[in-house]
Image: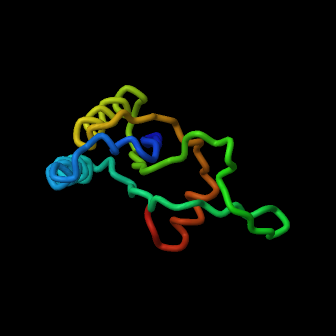
Amino acid sequence: MTRYLISFNDGAMDHIPREEMADVGKASHAVVQEAVNAGVWVFGAGLERQRASVVGTDGTVTDGPYPETKEVIGGFVVVDVPSREEALEWAGKIAAGCRCAQEVRELLPDPETDAMVREAGRTR
């Protein structure tokens, strides 16, 4: 199977009135439960609305993202599914639950890391 990153931009849910956020949470968690039950859920989370830190190859830490960056990620889900079409179907379910558009990207396979994780006794 192939892993896909499904994500939305920070601020993508700003159009939702505060009093409706509990309903959005319930709908979103229902999609998570469906994905868990289907065996495709890997991980997902919303991100705190804060500036990121950028760590350079020399260990130098600077504030980020850079001012010219217009969009930053607000939340994401990783699913493990057989096809892009199925990833798009899950993205549609997530979009409906979160009430915001989702971006879908295929993650590059990394058999070496998968082997390391299996050897450490974890599944990936």
Left or right position of 84 against 37: right
Looking at the image, the residue that sits furthest to the top is: 85
Q: Which residue lies at the image location 33% right of the left edge and 51% below the top edge?
A: 41
Looking at the image, the residue that sits furthest to the right is: 58
**Residue 104 is at least partly visible in this image:** yes
Q: Is residue 21 above or below residue 71?
A: below
Q: Which residue lies at the image location 44% right of the left edge and 43% below the top edge?
A: 7
Please name the colour scheme applied to the rendered image.
Answer: rainbow
- Please state the horizontal and vertical placement of residue 97, each as a whole percent of the image: 23, 42
Q: Which residue lies at the image location 34% right of the left edge and 31% below the top edge?
A: 86
**Residue 37 is at least partly visible in this image:** no
Q: Is residue 124 above or below residue 103?
A: below
Q: Which residue lies at the image location 20% right of the left edge and 48% below the top edge?
A: 24
Left or right position of 88 against 114: left
Left or right position of 100 against 54: left
Specify the quadrant that holds the N terminus.
top left
- Please state the horizontal and vertical placement of residue 62, each as a whole percent of the image: 74, 64
